[in-house]
Amino acid sequence: MSGAGNWSDAMGEAITLAQSSDAPHGENPRVGCVIVDASGAIVGRGYHRGAGTPHAEVAALADAGERALGATAVVTLEPCAHTGRTGPCTAALLAAGITGVVFAQADPTPQAGGGAQVLRAAGLDVIAGVRVDEAARINTAWTFAAMHLRPMVTWKVAVSLDGRVAGPDGGPTAITGAAARALVHELRADVDAIVVGTGTALVDDPSLTVRVPGREIANPPLRVVVGSRPIPPDAHVLDDAAPSLLIDESNPAVLLSDLYQRGIRHVLLEGGPTLASAFLSAHVIDRVEWYVAPILLGAGPVALPGVDGASLVGVDVTDVSVVGEDVRIVGHVRYEGSEA
Ligand code: AOF
Ligand code: ZN
């Protein structure tokens, strides 16, 4: 097998497969695989469809059938070496007579990692790291969660020009316009859970569902309401449009660890100020999507009323755009003096 550059196109196909519309979010990564025969032709394609279903390699091998003999598997994630809900891909590749494996991202989990070593020890030609940045971007939250043993947290907030998240009476106020709200629904479609405090659930009575025109949401995100105040049974957040979870847990780290155990890998924090302050104080906000709307409220609650050590928090901005009349700022949070 020759250099990494020759596998770039095949890896591109695998990356496209990994992003198929029914590929999973949540507990399992999105993975694509193609089988390339000795003449360079793609003879099998597959991708992973979620926990409990065949891994991408197994799906691609099934598609290739006997043409897998002597072929190379090109896969976006290092083949697993473990028996989880399904058997090890390393064994499936060897059994099918694959002689080379090209992968992009190394598997960061202690359970499934180490497949490259197993394959090399079995005499296969293994190349790692082909188009790794693109492949890793498909599974940003999953990779983060595997490394930190908690979900990645994106905080979405909308403020007025004078930095307030609600009007003087604290009641629900439409801050951003329709275009920004539509983008927030796209964001919700990409996460595994949406977290709000009981205050937001009581005041705004949000439904926290995903509404994206033309897009069917097979597994809507879990709606998590955090706090001790009782929520009336007819609250929108408790309707049967999506699953809901009420948790009386004030420690964000404990809450996130609980959500991780439930298979949540990406959390969208949608409010309100008390909960956001607690998350930022605990250094567990990882990304922000910050909307600034062209209104002046003059009074009312600010986005972060009580943060410990807020002056030590910076944001590495990755995108600034105008959405309708609002400004959207996206960035990664940087906690000075910590690795986070
Ligand atoms: C692969 N190919 O397509 C996927 C992999 O317990 P399971 O069977 O659901 O395995 C899940 C773990 O296996 C997951 O956390 C990740 O480390 C790896 N996923 N590996 O070789 C795949 N989806
Ligand atoms: Zn596997």
Image (cartoon, rainbow, N blue to C red):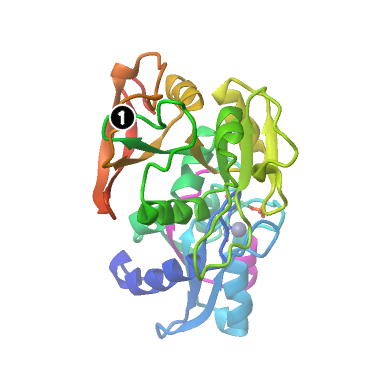
Quadrant containing ligand 1 = bottom right
Q: Position of residue 13 (x, y in %)?
A: 42, 73
Q: Which residue of the protein is positioned furthest toward the front in this rendering?
A: 169
Assess whether residue 21 is covered by the magenta stretch. no
Q: Nearer the viewer, residue 219 or 164?
A: 164
The residue sitting at 34% across, 54% down in the picture is 133
Q: Nearer the viewer, residue 54 or 223?
A: 223
Q: Which residue of the protein is positioned furthest toward the top in this rendering?
A: 308
Q: Position of residue 266 (x, y in %)?
A: 52, 44
The residue sitting at 54% across, 53% down in the picture is 115
State which quadrant residue 178 falls in.
bottom left
Mark 1 neighbour density, 10 Å: few (under 14) some (14–19) many (20 or more): many
Q: Nearer the viewer, residue 63 or 258?
A: 258
**Above-or-below relation of 103 to 251:** below
Q: Point out the image quarter for the C terminus.
A: top left
* SS at circle 1: loop
Q: Point out the image quarter for the N terminus.
A: bottom left
- Tell me if the residue at label 1 has its CB under 8 Å from ligand 1: no
The residue sitting at 29% across, 55% down in the picture is 324
Q: Position of residue 72 (x, y in %)?
A: 47, 73
State which quadrant residue 58 falls in.
bottom right
Span of residues in magenta:
91-108
Look at the image and tell me whether residue 79 can be seen.
yes
Assess whether residue 102 is covered by the magenta stretch. yes
**Above-or-below relation of 128 to 21:** above
Amino acid type, residue under disc 1 in the picture? Gly
Q: Which residue is mark 1?
A: 163
